Structure formats: structure tokens, C-alpha cells
Amino acid sequence: MASSRSGVEFRDFFPSMVEKLGAEGFLDELCNGFRLLMDSEKRVITFESLKRNSAAVLGLKGMGDEELMCMMKEGDLDGDGSLNQMEFCVLMFRLSPDLMKGSRMWLEEVMKNKM
């Protein structure tokens, strides 16, 4: 199990998901996760949509507003106060130390298959 800066512990299943689904299948699953968390009208993840959906979708019942806001700020690369799909996927990679280690290998695998 890994521990985030907020003290919330999580188990990193992403590397085993990549092994099972392949790089492209894993990215599809991340996109599905984004759609479950996003505000359906705004088409981005807002603080409100994350708060509303995180307990049911992510099992993060114990996370308070401060932790959710930290998660939003960490992933918000363009500073608009929300997470688009790309920002969400980047954040998920950054939260998985093992994915960060293997990301170059998976990128090369995807590029090789595309060419």
C-alpha cells in the first residue's frame, strides 16, 4: 500500500491493470474513470463532481474537502479549477510510482505498434 501526502492509503493496482489490459486498454479504462467522475454538463471534473462521485466511484469515503481540493490543485495543469481528461490521466500516472517507472516502456510499446 502507498500513502499519499494527505495520509490516505491506497493500493496501486495500475501496474497489474496495464499488464492485463495492455497500455491502450489501460488508457481506455482511465478515460472511463474520468467519465464517471466528471460533471456531465461541463464535461470536466469539478470539485463538486469529484466530491459527489469520489466515495461511490473511488471508494474514498473518508476524504475531506481539503484532500479533494489538494487532488484537484495537483492535477489542474492549466489553472482553470477543473480537470479535463488529459489532466486526469496525467494525475493518475503521477499518483502511481510504478506506472511512472514503466511509462517510458509502455509509450515505446504503443509507438512501436502504431508504426
Image: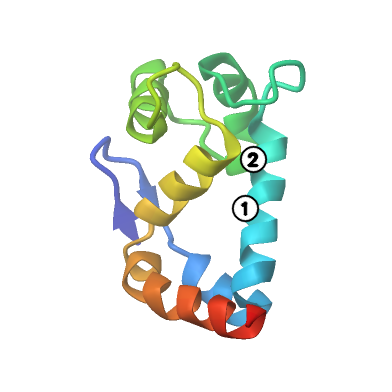
Mark 1 residue crowding within 10 angstroms, few (<14) / some (14–19) / many (20+): many
Quarter of the image containing the N terminus? bottom left
Q: Residue at x 42, y 45 (%)?
A: 91
C-alpha separation, residue under disc 2 versus residue under disc 1 = 6 Å
Element class at badge 1: helix
Which of the two residues, 23 or 72, is positioned nearer the viewer here? 23
Which residue in the structure is indicated by mark 1?
A: 30
Q: Is 31 placed above or below 115 here?
A: above
- Please give the name of the residue rendered at 35% of the width and 25% of the height, measured from the top-left corner: 73
Q: Is residue 104 above or below residue 86?
A: below
Taking the view exactly as shown, the residue that stands out farthest to the right is 41
Please state which of residues 66 and 92 is positioned toward the viewer in this rendering. 92
33 with respect to 109 (left or right): right
Q: Position of residue 59 (x, y in %)?
A: 57, 41
Q: Which residue is mark 2?
A: 34
Does residue 55 appear left or right of residue 93 in this picture?
A: right
* Drawn side of residue 64 relative to residue 115, left or right: left
Give percent across and percent down for residue 87: 48, 39
User: Position of 1 compared to 19: left or right?
Assistant: left
Residue 35, percent across and down?
Answer: 71, 37
Task: Determine the secondary structure under disc 2.
Answer: helix
Q: Is residue 101 visible?
A: yes
On screen, residue 97 above or below 85: below
Determine whether label 2 and label 1 are within 8 Å by CB. yes
Count of marks placed on residues: 2
Identity of the residue drawn at 27% across and 35% down: 6
User: Quick one: 7 or 17, which is closer to the camera?
Assistant: 17
| Kind of residue sitting beneath label 2 | Phe
Q: Residue at x 45, y 17 (%)?
A: 80
